[in-house]
Image (spheres, rainbow, N blue to C red):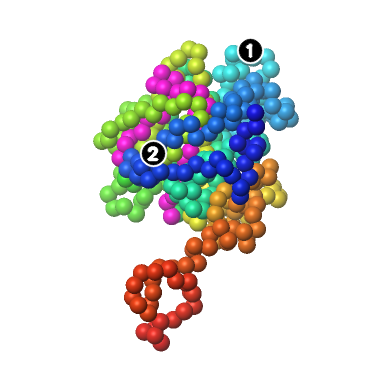
């Protein structure tokens, strides 16, 4: 059976997801939105098989990599992990336990790029944070039995964007519940500022006079995580999910996961992060030398890294990258086509002659009589 990823083009689709008014309100009111069954089963089957092959070291790309280091972080805050196979001497069970999560594989694997740019996921993002969407990050969470969760944190602490428009899209590969480490959200905490670090890497709203600086962010030990008392001010909701469900959540909302308490169930998920393509970011530079798909990786004056990230939908006045593996998206359209899809931006509301509200073509060079 052909998957949505194999049959969808950017411009002509019959499977577009239409966000409802109630879903839009829910996202704003509670800080997150669950869209059930958004990713079709055929796509999930493809991703699950790929994930199992990766866990066992069966991908061709893994055979040409070396596991010189488990993780490293570059100057722009992005965690990088080599795409390598687990050591050969491990049993299949031990190999499945080897990785907890892997970052940024959309820059190395075609399938991860396709899921980052999954058309039905972008349909929702286009409404929630768009219409212009920049694709920033991927993470593959494997979370084998017995592995720890991640403590309370805010995603904008790690990936700041200005204007602040960060949004995560968490695709469930396995059934997830309280036993194997589903997501928890502190409902209402999306209205909190981003709390800055006491020291080290991290972003926060330091311009707020009385804001608290925090330590232990993401630490699953609540007593060592300074965000725990803030999360405890709000109702905390467990979000159980089935394969193909997608959880969308903004960059401010406090969220966490707990340990996988089971002995035989994984909690695997594919997570993408996005922002409005007209937001500025200095996060996640593509530091691969001479990457032909990226614009300037880091602007030498502003340190902007937008040129490292893929324009998924809409248009932008800022730099952007093209997909390495040619996945259909806005970045591959001509500037003229991108502009045609956003022609409404050329009109403004207001009729100077009558004083009534109406659609009029906007001329940025027009001067009113009062300005003469």
Q: Residue furthest bottom?
A: 372
Instruction: Pick the residue in front: 262 or 291.
Output: 262
Say how many tags the image has. Answer: 2
- Whole-percent x, y for residue 335 in the image: 62, 60
Q: Which residues are magenta?
A: 163-190
Compared with residue 263, is residue 20 higher up or lower down, i.e. above or below?
below
Residue indicated by mark 2:
32
Quote the CA–CA distance across marks 1 and 2. 39 Å
Place of residue 95 in the rendered image (x, y in percent of width and height, measured from the top left) = 61, 18
Which disc number belongs to residue 91?
1
State the residue at coordinates (36%, 27%): 238
Residue 300, above or below 151: below
- Mark 1 and mark 2 lie on one chain; the one further toward the N terminus is 2
Task: State the residue at coordinates (70%, 50%).
Answer: 292
Instruction: In the displayed orientation, state which residue is furthest to the front.
Output: 14
Q: Is residue 318 visible?
A: no
- Establish if 310 lies above or below 270: below
Would you identify the image quadrant in which residue 35 lies?
A: top left
10 Å neighbourhood of mark 1: few (<14), some, or many (≥20)?
few
């Amino acid at each position: 059976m052909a998957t949505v990823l194999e049959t969808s083009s950017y411009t002509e689709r019959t499977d577009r997801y239409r966000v409802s008014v109630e879903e839009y309100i829910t996202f704003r009111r509670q800080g997150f939105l669950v869209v059930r069954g958004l990713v079709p089963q055929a796509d999930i089957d493809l991703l699950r098989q790929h994930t199992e092959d990766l866990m066992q070291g069966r991908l061709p790309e893994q055979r040409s990599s070396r596991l010189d280091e488990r993780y490293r972080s570059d100057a722009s805050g992005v965690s990088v992990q080599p795409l390598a196979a687990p050591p050969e001497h491990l049993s299949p069970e031990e190999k499945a336990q080897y990785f907890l999560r892997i970052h940024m594989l959309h820059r190395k694997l075609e399938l991860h790029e396709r899921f980052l740019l999954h058309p039905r996921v972008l349909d929702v993002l286009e409404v929630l944070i768009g219409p212009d969407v920049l694709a920033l990050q991927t993470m593959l969470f494997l979370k084998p039995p017995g592995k720890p969760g991640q403590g309370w944190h805010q995603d904008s602490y790690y990936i700041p964007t200005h204007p602040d428009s960060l949004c995560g899209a968490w695709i469930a590969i396995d059934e997830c519940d309280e036993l194997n480490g589903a997501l928890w959200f502190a409902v209402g905490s999306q209205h909190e500022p981003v709390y800055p670090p006491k020291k080290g890497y991290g972003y926060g709203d330091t311009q707020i006079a009385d804001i608290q600086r925090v330590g232990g962010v993401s630490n699953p030990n609540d007593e060592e995580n300074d965000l725990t008392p803030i999360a405890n001010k709000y109702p905390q909701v467990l979000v159980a999910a089935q394969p193909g469900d997608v959880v969308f959540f903004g960059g401010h909302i406090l969220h966490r996961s707990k340990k996988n308490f089971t002995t035989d169930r994984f909690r695997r998920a594919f997570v993408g992060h996005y922002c409005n393509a007209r937001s500025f970011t200095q996060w996640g530079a593509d530091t691969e030398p001479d990457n032909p798909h990226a614009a300037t990786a880091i602007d030498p004056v502003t340190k902007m890294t937008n040129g490292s990230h893929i324009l998924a939908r809409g248009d932008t006045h800022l730099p952007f990258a093209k997909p390495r593996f040619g996945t259909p998206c806005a970045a591959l359209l001509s500037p003229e086509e991108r502009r045609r899809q956003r022609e409404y931006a050329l009109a403004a509301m207001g009729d100077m002659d009558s004083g009534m509200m109406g659609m009029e073509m906007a001329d940025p060079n027009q001067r009113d009589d009062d300005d003469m």
